[in-house]
């Protein structure tokens, strides 16, 4: 087990490196001279040349990448010019809020996705299955940013049950119940699509598994049907669904960009959108690397769980 | 899905059914799928409107009119109202839909073009090219979905075209992987090799041989992604990173409307609803098409089998009486599989009984209905599609089909236990064998886990598994085939059953292991006084273990008697031919001929004797009416109008 985790951790290094290369290459697509962009079009050529040297823009691409990478490994993600503070401080602060939101959504979509899928499979072609299947299709097709707005209008503006936006109340908030109240609408909205995807996959996997010979064996043993479905079939189906839950972490982290914008959640997604509008490239770079890196870690986590559940999976 | 490759003989009527198609056609299935139809209608409607937009009598979508700002829907002259600049919302909605649809489809096509190109090149050339390209694709997939698009837009700057490129790039890996998979499958087929030998260049081969074959997959992949693409581009526009004013797509309309959501909700509600309807209709249609293309859905192979076979009897047997010490009595059992408009009579009226401490063999070719008979006894035939349509099964004096589900469950694994063929697929792969034994024990006895575990270890020892203590912790895949079959037997013995129903327990094993298993079963029978119903196609096995034998053909018993009678004086020509198939030690010159021809399809049984077409003694009377099961005395019976008297094998 430890060997497996260690191996996976080592295998993760090239993936993370590749990730930084891609981010670096994308950022080099930026048209124009960053030095000129910073100094404005009235800058003198001498000043531009000086800034270019200061920023390391006169070095080769490989050198630039190497400097960027080694700085990053040492915790130096550069300085955000629009916020005038170190990128790392900003993204770590924001990332916490995103993790709370995305983590909650991931838990919700896992629970409801599995539940919906199993119920759908067990009641195949019954009204419950038909209703759920249709609901799942709606969940997959609905634009999450629109759903967020609708939920906000209904539950926060009309009914006034929940706060409209933000992470904490401005006055007198800050405790856990306050956070939970603020968390409900955005996390539910964020979870909808992933719930649908997990539910679909769970349903088809359950149906597949329920036809397997070992299910017939379980029945031939005289086990009661609940045990057959929830222990035997579910475990076998779960093993196939877990990697997809890992993939859903990516959808949830990405989808957080919309949801954070809709609900004014102070997370990294909203920060990225703002940074893109203000062309704060270092902030974008840092944020993307951090989120993508954490996604890689999460997938590793999902693989380890699958490995724990399935004795057949080797490395 | 390796376990599906090895289907037990019980599924034979099923697989046979797949070949002879009489199932609903693809078109019927799609038409029957009302949701898909609805999706198609909506989508066609939207596309039509979008195509004729320029000639529709709509106001200019960009014409502002401050006096008419923020009108609610159904206002005079503005069906959907106006926005904050007094622009007509209906006109903007339709023009916006046009943009969104165009961008979504273009992004799909761009992603399909590059993704497919990568996939085809990677799959066609293989080796290093493949390796490098796929590692690159893996890297792209290591990013959370939308994040990569954001990074690209960040670099290129906001704008509709840039959003299009970003979304397209993000979806390239999906295409590349799908198409590569298909290409690898055909890159080494004969026609590609032939093209290479004929001196065609790689480019020509790819364009003329590979591309036409992967095209359907590309089209299907596009249809499943286009909805996503529309959603994602709308999302980027919503964030202000896509369409820039005055240009508008549905996403940017929604984004602008959001700012006024509390004063004029229709500004965000309507464009959002349009995106939703558009994507929903595409997904409904896509799902419908996918379902139609999925052969498993047509064959009913995706239906969930019920815990108990469906029972819908037209009769309850002939009321035959059996000796007092009978443990299992089967009376005119009939089991059918209904697939589409066809019904397959897998078991067409089977009667036999098993006495106490007796071993009865049920012999026949694959597809003769012997396994379905065995599974029918305790309602384990998968249903749908299986149904028990007639007859009666008395276990220990009680009618199994008249029992409640709970009562049947009580018998299963308790007084009557199954041993299946191919223990790799019949044992649960994710539970240790000890665990699975414990479960069997505790299903019928209220004992603690610890006690049950001790009993499980004892059972493993009983079936001669070395080091049962440590073996109990093993998973099925860690054991050899023979070991696994012993586990299967141990599981059947867990609750000291009075009857063991063994469905080809030795078929998947090699000969020496087979002999060991047979010896084991014989010993257990002698020690515990258990009755055994032994299903096999192998007369060699029958002679070793069975007291009496029933021979099945096309769903019916054609001959029954003591092992001595059936093996040495077969009365039915089929039995004789079957025995001739078994090679014998010390008789190398003996002809071991296969029986010519195939058994008849059980959905289309001929009148008279089902074996008539393959029988060398056939005469006209064989093909008329139904052939009765005649008693030859001393418990020997045969379903033949001209039994072979005194045949001596």
Image: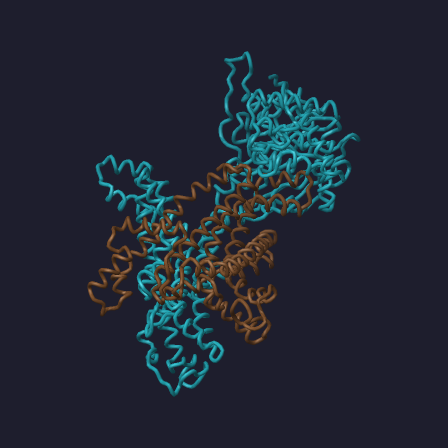
Residue B520 position in % (x across, y down): 66, 23
Residue B553 visible? The answer is no
Which residue is outermost to the top? B586
Can see residue A219? yes
| Outermost residue toward the right in this view | B324
* In-front residue for pair B600/A294: A294
Residue B449: give x, y in percent of width and height: 71, 38
Judged left or right of residue B590, residue B313 is: right
Q: Residue A163 in the image: x percent, y percent?
A: 56, 71
Quarter of image, res B201: top left
Q: How is the image coloured?
A: by chain
Q: Which residue lies furthest to the left in this view?
A: A45
- Determine the image quadrant of residue B74: bottom left
Q: In this view, does B323 lie above or below B218?
A: above
Residue at the farthest bottom position: B67
- Count of number-bearing discs: 0
In the rendered view, tell whether residue B277 sits above or below residue B441.
below
Chain B display color: cyan
The quadrant in which the C terminus of chain B is found is: top right
Q: Quadrant of residue A123?
A: bottom right
Residue drawn where x is 49% and y is 66% of the image: A265
From what the image shows, is residue B179 above or below residue B482?
below
* Horizontal side of residue B21 vs B106, given as left or right: right
Establish if B3 lies above or below A293.
above
Between residue B642 and residue A258, name the one nearer to us: A258
Residue B233: give x, y in percent of width and height. Answer: 38, 63
Which of A293/A52 is in front? A52
Which chain is brown in the picture? A
């Amino acid at each position: 087990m430890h060997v497996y985790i260690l191996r996976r951790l080592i295998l993760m290094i090239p993936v993370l490196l590749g990730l930084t290369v891609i981010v670096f290459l994308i950022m080099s697509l930026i048209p124009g001279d960053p030095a000129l962009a910073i100094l404005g079009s009235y800058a003198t050529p001498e000043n531009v040349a000086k800034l270019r040297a200061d920023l390391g823009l006169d070095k080769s691409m490989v050198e630039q990448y190497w400097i960027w990478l080694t700085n990053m490994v040492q915790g130096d993600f550069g300085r955000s010019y629009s916020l005038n503070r170190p990128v790392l401080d900003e993204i770590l602060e924001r990332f916490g809020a995103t993790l709370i939101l995305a983590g909650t959504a991931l838990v919700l979509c896992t629970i409801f996705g599995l539940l919906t899928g199993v119920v759908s499979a067990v009641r195949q072609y019954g009204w419950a299955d038909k209703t759920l299947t249709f609901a799942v299709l709606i969940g997959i097709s609905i634009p999450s940013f629109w759903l967020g707005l609708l939920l906000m209008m209904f539950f926060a503006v009309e009914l006034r049950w929940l706060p409209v936006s933000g992470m904490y109340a401005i006055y007198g908030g800050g405790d856990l119940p306050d956070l939970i109240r603020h968390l409900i609408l955005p996390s539910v909205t964020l979870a909808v699509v992933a719930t649908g995807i997990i539910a679909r996959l769970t349903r088809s996997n359950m149906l597949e598994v329920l036809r397997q010979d070992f299910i017939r064996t379980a029945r031939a043993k005289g086990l009661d049907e609940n045990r057959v479905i929830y222990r035997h079939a579910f475990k076998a189906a779960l093993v196939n669904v877990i990697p997809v839950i890992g993939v859903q972490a990516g959808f949830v982290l990405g989808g957080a960009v919309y949801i954070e914008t809709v609900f004014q959640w102070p997370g990294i997604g909203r920060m990225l959108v703002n940074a893109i509008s203000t062309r704060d490239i270092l902030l974008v770079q840092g944020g993307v690397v951090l989120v993508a890196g954490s996604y890689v870690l999460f997938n590793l986590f999902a693989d380890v769980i699958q490995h724990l559940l399935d004795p057949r999976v080797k490395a | 899905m390796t376990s599906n490759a090895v289907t037990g003989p019980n599924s034979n009527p099923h697989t046979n059914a797949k070949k002879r198609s009489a199932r609903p056609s693809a078109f019927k299935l799609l038409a029957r799928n009302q949701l898909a139809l609805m999706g198609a209608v909506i989508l066609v409607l939207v596309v039509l409107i979008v195509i004729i937009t320029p000639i529709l009598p709509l106001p200019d979508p960009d014409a502002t009119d401050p006096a008419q700002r923020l009108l609610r829907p159904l206002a005079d002259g503005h069906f959907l109202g106006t926005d904050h600049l007094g622009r007509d919302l209906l006109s903007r909605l339709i023009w916006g839909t046009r943009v969104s649809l165009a961008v979504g489809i273009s992004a799909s096509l761009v992603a399909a073009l590059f993704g497919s190109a990568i996939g085809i090149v990677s799959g066609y050339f293989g080796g290093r090219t493949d390796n490098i390209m796929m590692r690159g694709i893996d890297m792209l997939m290591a990013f959370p979905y939308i994040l990569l698009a954001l990074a690209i837009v960040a670099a290129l700057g906001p704008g509709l075209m840039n959003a299009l490129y970003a979304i397209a790039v993000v979806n390239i890996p999906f295409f590349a992987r799908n198409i590569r998979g298909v290409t690898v499958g055909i890159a080494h087929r004969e026609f590609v090799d032939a093209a290479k030998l004929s001196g065609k260049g790689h480019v020509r081969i790819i364009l003329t041989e590979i591309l036409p074959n992967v095209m359907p997959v590309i089209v299907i992949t596009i249809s499943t992604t286009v909805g996503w693409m529309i959603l994602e581009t709308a999302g980027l526009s919503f964030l202000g990173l896509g369409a820039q004013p005055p240009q508008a797509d549905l996403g940017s309309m929604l984004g602008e409307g959001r700012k006024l959501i509390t004063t004029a909700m229709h500004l965000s509600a309507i464009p959002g609803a349009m995106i939703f309807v558009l994507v929903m209709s595409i997904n409904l249609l896509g799902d419908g098409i996918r379902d139609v293309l999925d052969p498993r859905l047509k064959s009913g192979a995706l239906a969930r089998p019920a815990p108990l076979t469906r029972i819908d009897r037209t009769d309850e047997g002939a009321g035959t009486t059996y000796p007092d010490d009978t443990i299992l009595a089967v009376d005119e059992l009939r089991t059918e599989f209904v697939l589409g408009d066809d019904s397959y009579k897998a078991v067409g009226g089977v009667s036999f009984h098993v006495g106490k401490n007796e071993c009865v063999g049920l012999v026949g070719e694959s597809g003769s209905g012997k396994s379905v008979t065995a599974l029918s006894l305790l309602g384990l035939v998968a249903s749908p599609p299986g149904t028990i349509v007639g007859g009666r099964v008395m276990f220990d004096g009680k009618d199994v089909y008249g029992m409640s589900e709970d009562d049947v469950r009580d018998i299963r694994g308790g007084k009557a236990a199954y041993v299946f063929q191919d223990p790799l697929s019949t044992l649960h792969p994710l539970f240790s064998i000890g665990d699975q034994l414990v479960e069997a024990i505790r299903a019928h006895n209220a004992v603690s886990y610890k006690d049950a575990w001790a009993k499980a270890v004892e059972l493993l020892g009983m079936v001669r598994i070395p080091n049962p203590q440590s073996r109990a912790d093993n998973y099925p895949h860690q054991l050899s085939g023979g070991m696994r079959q012993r586990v299967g037997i141990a599981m059947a013995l867990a609750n000291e059953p009075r009857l063991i129903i063994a469905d080809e327990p030795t078929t998947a094993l090699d000969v020496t292991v087979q002999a060991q298993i047979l010896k084991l079963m014989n010993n257990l029978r002698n020690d515990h006084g258990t009755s055994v119903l032994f299903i096999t196609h192998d007369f060699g096995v029958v002679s070793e273990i069975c007291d009496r034998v029933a021979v099945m053909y096309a769903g019916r018993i054609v001959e029954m008697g003591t092992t001595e009678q059936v093996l040495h004086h077969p009365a039915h020509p089929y039995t004789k031919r079957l025995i001739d198939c078994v090679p014998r030690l010390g008789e190398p010159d003996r002809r071991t001929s296969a029986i010519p021809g195939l058994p008849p399809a059980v959905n289309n049984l001929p009148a008279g004797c089902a074996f008539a077409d393959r029988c060398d003694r056939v005469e006209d009377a064989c093909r008329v009416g139904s052939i009765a099961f005649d008693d030859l005395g001393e418990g020997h019976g045969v379903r033949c109008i001209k039994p072979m008297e005194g045949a001596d094998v």
